[in-house]
Image (tube, coloured by chain):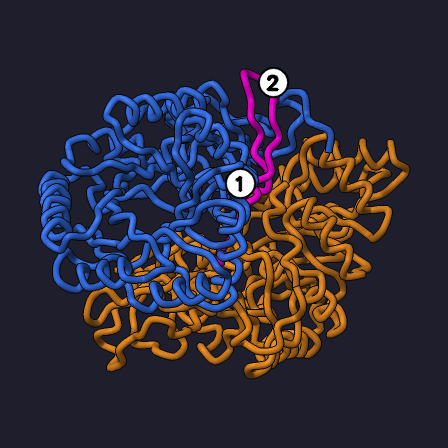
Chain colours: A blue, B orange
Amino acid sequence: MANPATLTDLETPALLIDLDRLERNLDRVAEYAREHGLRLRPHTKTHKTPEIGRMQLDRGAVGLTVAKTTEAEVMLASGTPDLLVAYPVLGQKKLERLAEVARHTRVTVAFDSFEVADGLAEIAAAKGLRFGALVEANLGMNRVGLTPGSELMRLAAHVAASPQLELEGVNFYPGNVWPPDEDAESKFEQVRQGVARLREDFERAGLPLGIVSGGSSPTLFRSHEIEGLNEIRPGTYVFNDGDLVEAGHCTWDDCAASVLTTVISTPREGFGMLDGGSKTFSSDRIPGQDPPLFGRIVEVPEARIYKQNEEHGHVDFREAGERPRIGDRLRVIPNHVCVCVNLHEKMYGIRGDRVEHVWDVRGRGKLQ
Amino acid sequence: MANPATLTDLETPALLIDLDRLERNLDRVAEYAREHGLRLRPHTKTHKTPEIGRMQLDRGAVGLTVAKTTEAEVMLASGTPDLLVAYPVLGQKKLERLAEVARHTRVTVAFDSFEVADGLAEIAAAKGLRFGALVEANLGMNRVGLTPGSELMRLAAHVAASPQLELEGVNFYPGNVWPPDEDAESKFEQVRQGVARLREDFERAGLPLGIVSGGSSPTLFRSHEIEGLNEIRPGTYVFNDGDLVEAGHCTWDDCAASVLTTVISTPREGFGMLDGGSKTFSSDRIPGQDPPLFGRIVEVPEARIYKQNEEHGHVDFREAGERPRIGDRLRVIPNHVCVCVNLHEKMYGIRGDRVEHVWDVRGRGKLQ
């Protein structure tokens, strides 16, 4: 397809990226990291697009983060000098693929078990490679990661003793410090204390702790309050979304991604149907929002997307003072942009009404 | 990639289709339709794969249904003699694409507005084509569709008067007769009365009513109770899922689709993390299930997937009497298979442990 010149050339639904906002979001976080001396290794799960990875590197990111081996393969096209796979890699075929990626760039893996450490060391020995390693700690998220203590330190010592692995430090994800409810402050304090404990334990064990990698978009701008943290891996900040607005991280005007939709039916007074639903926006809800809304319409923020099916967005326009007409085009900011982007084949980078870039979302559906 | 020979050759997460179950599900509905003299025009939104569309046609389906123009393009590869786009098609580029599809197979569109009727008629005149048309009625779903009455009949007369459109009949979707709560019976009765009203109105107006197309998977086997209904368009029945088990349509043993996952971390006693989350299963919840579960583990049905992130499934194994080990492979039946399939690049058709087919999900992400 030839590049569409303007928005009116696009068929809907179409995922739009406001380039001015994207660049502003990228700059904002790059400056924050620079100001506080933090390594920035952004998570590319949000955009899944090497071109945007390149924009992050050009603004000072030291490398890029991915969740899956297949995402690592895709992200090589960004030209990154460093890839962190922030996910335990298991299985012979995946390890072989990851070893191939490591021929092209430095690869570090974050994990929490001897099983994963040994699998990595084995394939590295077979292929004549080394992997960087971050031991994953659980500082309250209760997902992956070992609680600071003896088991975590045994794993760290095991990694440090492996000729095929280079112990770079520790990794954690403070995604539990969100939503910003009454417990958030004590959770944040738990993270601070966890990092302090890790630093003590590593020092006592005489193990190197070069990197302490944490941070998530909702708590991003508080990263410097965690003493000893020296790397952040935010993802969602590139586009922002309803979740992050509700979390107080940004405003609606900072949301760079929206889905251009069309009103395809106005069967009842005050209601309209959009040509997008759970296969376009995802079904993710904003935590605590009850009843849930499935996105925010930029042009008519008072309208409510109160329900969706796979390909239908049900909109109540009654409070909006406007009546939808068949053929109207409306932009929807998704609740959770990471899962929304993963549903789209292409992203259209726009300035005003002009389409500057058509990017393939090359990492979409890369699950393995 | 060469076809993997067995399940152990697959990387995870991988979408598995149990071929014996798929064939049984296909046979069951084909036989039901034959027994009751119903045209079967299955909705392909669930599988999005021409090979399975072909299997439906080979069992007597008169045609296939799609939601979007790009899905219609994909489904041409099934060799179908007939495609119903059960969605209002709007926009010049889409209409041009649909006209191109109509050069290869008969195309019918379901819609509820003069705007869509006129757009179709205009492109058909320009390209020297005709489209079939179904007028969409709202029998309680409150999505698209006009309530039976004068406006619907005006639209039907308008279509009948167009040389480029052939009025085939009416279309509706009784998706509101679900979940099977205390209101379900009165909703079903509303559908029956709606169809009766439509038949009277068409007869009084002297308009042809060849096709009365309705039916959805949850109410599928009651379609013959709706007098005058002569076509069904079920989708989910090919695979079934947690939603349909809860709705009483089938049992867990009828669920043909599952996602093969790996336990990638066991950080706390009694808990394990799967290598799939909302980007693998979707975030769709089973209506009425509170707290929600995000799929059912075939091997350990007592285990609870109580939470998910994009790439993590959080499983509580404490009630299951089994302890997960890192590297264990477990199959998960999704809550809503249609949105789950749309997240995967490939489906693996299996019998026992043997992989018989590797199908590209060619319709995934076809949103336009």
Q: What range of the chain is rendered magenta?
A: A343-368
Q: Quadrant of residue B1?
A: bottom right
Q: Residues within 10 Å of mark 1 (few under 14, many from 20)?
A: many
Name the amino acid, label 1. Answer: Gly
Residue A124, position as x, y percentages in the image: 44, 61
* Letter of the chain that mark 2 sits on in the rendering: A
Task: Single out the mark in the foreground, 2 or 1.
Answer: 2
Viewer-proximal residue among B24 and A129? A129
Q: Is residue A310 visible?
A: no
Task: Using the image, determine if residue A207 lies above or below residue A96.
Answer: above
- Residue visible at 24% across and 29% down in the picture: A221
Query: Residue reaching furthest right?
Result: B128
Distance between mark 2 and mark 1 Cα atoms: 22 Å
Q: Which mark is residue A91?
A: none
A254 on left or right of A265: left
A271 on left or right of B102: left
Residue A226, position as x, y percentages in the image: 15, 36
Q: Earlier in the sequence, mark 2 or mark 1?
A: 1
A365 on left or right of B321: right
Q: Which mark is residue A354?
A: 2
Viewer-proximal residue among B319 and B6? B6
- Residue visible at 48% across and 67% down in the picture: B259
Residue located beneath label 1 in the image:
A276
Task: Using the image, determine if residue A7 lies above or below residue A38.
Answer: above
Residue B316, position as x, y percentages in the image: 25, 68
* Letter of the chain that mark 1 sits on in the rendering: A
Q: Secondary structure at mark 1?
A: loop
Name the amino acid, label 2. Answer: Arg
